[in-house]
Amino acid sequence: MKKKIVAIVLAMVLLVSHQITNKPTTSKAQQDAASLAQNLSFTGTWSSDKWLMSEEQEDWYKLVISSDGRVELKVMSYIDGFTYFQLYTSDFSEELYRDNAYDGNITQPDTAVANYSLSKGTYYLKVDNGSYIGKYRLNASFTSYGVNDNNAHSYDSPQTYTLGTTITGAITATDDQDWFKVVIPKNAYYVFSLSSYAAPYTNFWIYNKDLSETEENGDAYQGSLSKPAVTKKECVLAKGTHYIKISGDEGKYIFTMRALNQSNCEHEYENTWVNETYLQNGYTLHKCKKCGKTYKDEYIKKKTLNQNYFWSIGGVVAGKKKVKLGWSTTYDSDGYQIQYAQNKKMKKAKVIKVKNGYCSTKTIKKLKKKKRYYFRIRAYKKVQGKTVYAKWSKKRSAKVK
């Protein structure tokens, strides 16, 4: 009889060393689970065989997460039925995830893959078999998100954000929103850029100081670990304190917020036609109403003064030591410039200015008799302190009497 009692006690001790027979719904059960849990290493390799040898057996594992990141857990089940695995918070107050591998067998196991987005901390994994018996294996790996969001989870305790800096954060199983406070230095346009590595989406909201007004919001949709979804929004913000909230599906996100400038602006142009003048071409001016960037196109040539000509009859009439000139007038001119010389190349030519745009004749005196002189004329106009000239007319000549 004594031998039988000893055998029963020994069997019970061995069974408790391998399993926990009750769900951790009481503080005692929780203590037992925590004390018996094996550390689960993130090696990315398969464990040795683990056996569930009785109905409602539970194996417990402890996961220590050094920083916010992603855990990939694979469960390979050789059990012809369900193998359940659930993840709990460190105090067992919340079941974060529940998954299962189903209908494996001794020759062809079923492998279930689960991805967990977890904040820094300690978690417990329970593996149980319901009423099924058999073996399973585990494979766990961890990738850090590299966050710098400081776990600011509420409006009352936000992280201070500085314009132009980059925040890397994460929405996790225990952190469904992050809050940031930013001080805007002046009334202006600002650009908010969000990259989401989560699916289906990561949301953002920008609020005024007391959250009475939503000033901008948006989402980055269907991102992935290898290719984030990116959204960019421009908004006008008033000088003062504003709040930013990030929420959505579990996963990593990155955001920046900057004052709008010509390089990050999604331009909205207003178009103005600028008339041509004597100094510049006419064109269409496109100016962004947000950042002030401009460009020009649709050019037409600048204004020019018409070329003059001497009248065919009476345009160049020689007299005694003088020549009388007559020419076509030019619209919009301020006057005319006349050159004359005793050679066709107009070397050492003398210049006379006629300061009247409506004048059409001029007599040049004190010329040498019996000499041939060559003449040409052009109109001029003064514009903004500069003098604009027409092309020279064709030369005409006359022999002085």
Image: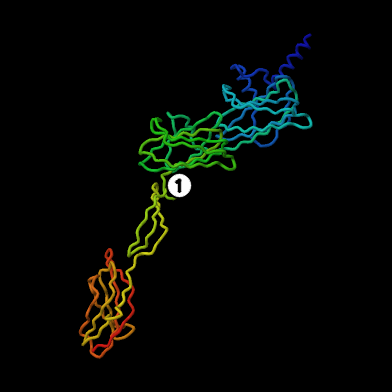
Quickly name the residue at label 1.
266
Residue at 40% over, 35% down: 242
Image quadrant where residue 377 sits: bottom left
Q: Going by the image, does 157 lie left or right of 305?
A: right
Q: Position of residue 142 (x, y in %)?
A: 61, 36
Image quadrant where residue 280 sits: bottom left
Q: Quadrant of the N terminus?
A: top right
Q: Is residue 33 above or below residue 159?
A: above
Q: Amino acid at mark 1?
A: Glu
Nearer the observer, 350 or 401: 401
Count of marks, rendered view: 1
Q: Position of residue 97 (x, y in %)?
A: 61, 27
Q: Position of residue 266 (x, y in %)?
A: 45, 47
Nearer the observer, 93 or 259: 259
Task: Report the residue that reaches farthest toward the bottom.
Answer: 370
Q: Judge whether residue 273 can be spotted in this image.
A: yes
Q: Going by the image, does 275 lie left or right of 319?
A: right
Q: Residues within 10 Å of mark 1 (few under 14, many from 20)?
A: some
Q: Judge whether residue 14 can be spotted in this image.
A: no
Q: Is residue 54 above or below residue 220?
A: above
